[in-house]
Image (cartoon, grey):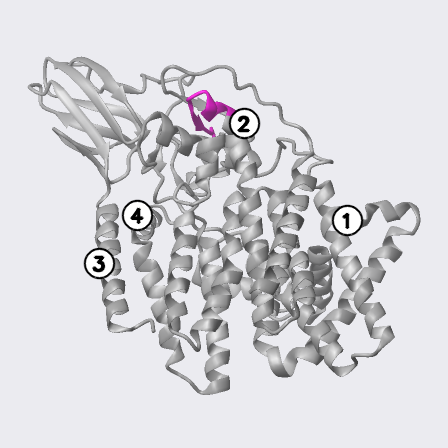
Amino acid sequence: MKKDLPYIFFITLITLFWFIIVFSDFQVVEQSDWDMVFGYHQSQRDIILKYHQFPLWNPYLCGGEPWLAHPVSDFLSPFFIFILFFGTIKGTIIAYFPQTLIGLLGMYFLSRHYGLSRNISLLSTIISLNIFNKITYIGIFIFLSFCFLPWIYLLFNKAKNEKKYMLYSIMLLAVIILTGYIYIFIMTLIFLFIDTIFYIAKYKKIKFILIFLGITIFALLLSAPKILPMLELLKQLPRITVFEAPKVLLNLDKFPFLIIEAKELLLPKESFYFLNRFINPDILQNIFYFIMTSIFIITFIMLWKKYKELLIIGLIFLLISLFNNSPFNLWSLLHFLLPSMGGPGKFAAVFIMTFSLSLGLVIKECQIKAPQSKTLKSIVTILVFLFTTSVFLYANMIFKTRDVMVYRLDNQQKKFSHKNVDPRNIFETIYIGRGVLSPHAINFFDAIGGQIPKKVLAKEEKGYRGEYYLLNGYGEVEQVMFSPNKMIFKLKLKDNDTLVINQNYFPGWRSSAGKITSYNGLISITLNQKISDLIIYYLPNSLISGIILFVLSLFTIGYGLKKGWFV
C-alpha cells in the first residue's frame, strides 16, 4: 500500500488538473440538464436550510410532488453537503471533484486487483476519465454516483474469497440507492449478476448466487426509507417511456455502429478538431475507426480465455447503449422488463469502465509475451499518448462552445406561488421562491412531472383563486405558516366547507382535523365549521414502513456480525 501512495497523490493531481480544465470555462448553458440540476438542488437546499425540514415533499416542481420518493432526489447523497455549504452553483461544481476522484481511485485499485502494474493501472484510470467527461458535458449530476461502481465491483470480487467484503459491498450499494438515480443501481445489479453467472459456471460454486442475493437484499433493506416511497410513487404514476420497437432484434448490418460508438466514447471527434486544418476530417476519423477496430479484435483475441466475463459485460452494456443502432437490440429486451427506464446511452459508462480495464490487461499480456519488443513498446506508447490526450482535449472543450444563459438572482419572492416557465429557466424561478409549472406537463423537464396531470394553476392563469381557498367561500382562512412539508391555517367558518390547497394531491398528507382527499387533483380537506385551527403535514406510510425495515436490517446485520456471517 505504501508504494501506491505516490500514485494516489498523482491521481489526485490528475483529477484536480481535469477539474480546472473543465470548469475554468464553465458557463451556465442552455438546452442541457445543468439548469434542471441547479433547480433540483436549489429546491432541496431551500427546504433544508430555509425551512429546516427533510425534503419529503417538494412544492417547487410540477405543482408539488413526493420528493424523497422521487427517483432523482439526491439530498441524501454524502456530497450534498457541498451544495448546502457553498451554495447551489458553486456547491454543485465543487462536488464534481471528490466524486470524480473516488471513481478514478476505484479504477486504479480495481486494476491493481486484476494484477496490473501501477503504471498500467494509472493508464486505465486516466482512460476512465472519459466517463466523467460525458457526465459533465450532459450535466446529469446524479449520474456521478457511478463513481462507486468500480469500488463495488472490486469489493464484490474480494467477497468471493472473504465474506467480510460482503458488508462493504452492501453499504456502498445502499449509498448508491440513497444518493438517487436508480439507473446506477440497476446497472450495478446487471453487472454483478452477469459476473456471478460466469463465476458459477467457471468454478461450479452455485452457492455464490447467495452472496449476490444477500448483498442485493440487504442493500435494499438499508435503503428502504427511499425505496418504499419510490415504489409507492411509481405505482401511483407509472413512468412508461415509449420507444419504437425494432423490427428485428438481430441485425448484423448495424455492426459498424458498434465501432463508431466505441470510437466516439473513447476518442471523440471533438477532441481532435484542431487536426482538421492539417488533415481531411473524414480521413482522420477513418484512421480512428481502424485503430478502434484493431484494438477490439486484439483485445478479444488476447483476453477471451482469461477474462471473457469482463469482455462480455462491456460488450453487453455497449449493445444496450446503441438502442436501435445495435447489432443485437438488448435495450428492447431490458426496456420490456423495466418500461420506466429511458436514455439507453447512459449504459455506455460501464463499457468505458470495462474497456479501460481491458486495455490495461492487453498491455500486461503483451509485456508478458514480448517483453523486449521495441515495436510493441512503441505501439503502447502511441496508444497511451492518444487516449490520454483525447481525454484532456475533450475536457478542454466541454464548456467553450456552449451558449450562455445569464441568471438574474437578485429578487427574492416573499410568498410562495406557482409560475409557468420555460423548462430552461427552472433554477432562476425556484431561486426566487416560486414553484415551476409548464403549460404542457407531458413535455416538461421532470422525470415524474410528465405523468402528473396539470391541475395546479399559476398566479397569472385564468381561474386562479390563490394558493389556498375555501371551495364554497363559507368564511375566512389565513395561512399562519407555510413550509414544504407542513402548513398551519387559522379558520373562521360560517358553515362546513372544504379547504383547497393549490398543490397536487398524493397519499401521505395528514391533518389535525378533517379528512384529506383529492379535489380535481389538488389537496383538499373537508372541514367542520367548528374547526378554527388546522395543521396539515406530509408523512407517507411508506416512509414509516421503510424506517422500520431499515432499523430491522441494522439489527439483522449486527446479529450477523456477532454470529460471524461476514467473516
Spatial CA distance of label 1 from label 2 is: 30 Å
The magenta stretch spans which residues?
A: 428-440
Residue labelled with disc 3: 552
In the image, residue 72 sits, relative to residue 128, either above or below, namely above
Q: Are the residues flagged by discs 2 and 4 in contact, CB closer than 8 Å?
A: no
Identify residue type, mark 4: Pro
| Residue 254 appears anywhere in the view | yes
* Residue 537 image point, x, y percent: 22, 32
Q: Nearer the viewer, residue 22 or 527?
A: 22
Q: Does the rendering let one see residue 520?
A: no
The first of marks 3 and 1 along the sequence is: 1
Mark positioned earlier in the residue sequence (1 or 2): 1
Q: Which mark is residue 271?
A: 1
Q: Secondary structure at mark 2?
A: loop
Residue occupying the far left of the picture: 530
Instruction: Give the mark nearest the N terminus, 3 or 2.
Output: 2
Residue picked out by circle 4? 229
Residue at x 54%, y 27% (from the top left corner) = 425
Q: CA distance from mark 4 to mark 1?
A: 43 Å
Secondary structure beneath label 1 = helix
Extreme-right residue of the structure = 278
The percent position of residue 62, horizontal first and vertical second, equals: 41, 32
- Measure the C-alpha gap from mark 4 to mark 3: 17 Å
Q: Is residue 298 magenta?
A: no
Name the one closer to the observer, 295 or 251: 295
Question: How far, Cα to Cα, is label 3 from label 1?
Answer: 51 Å
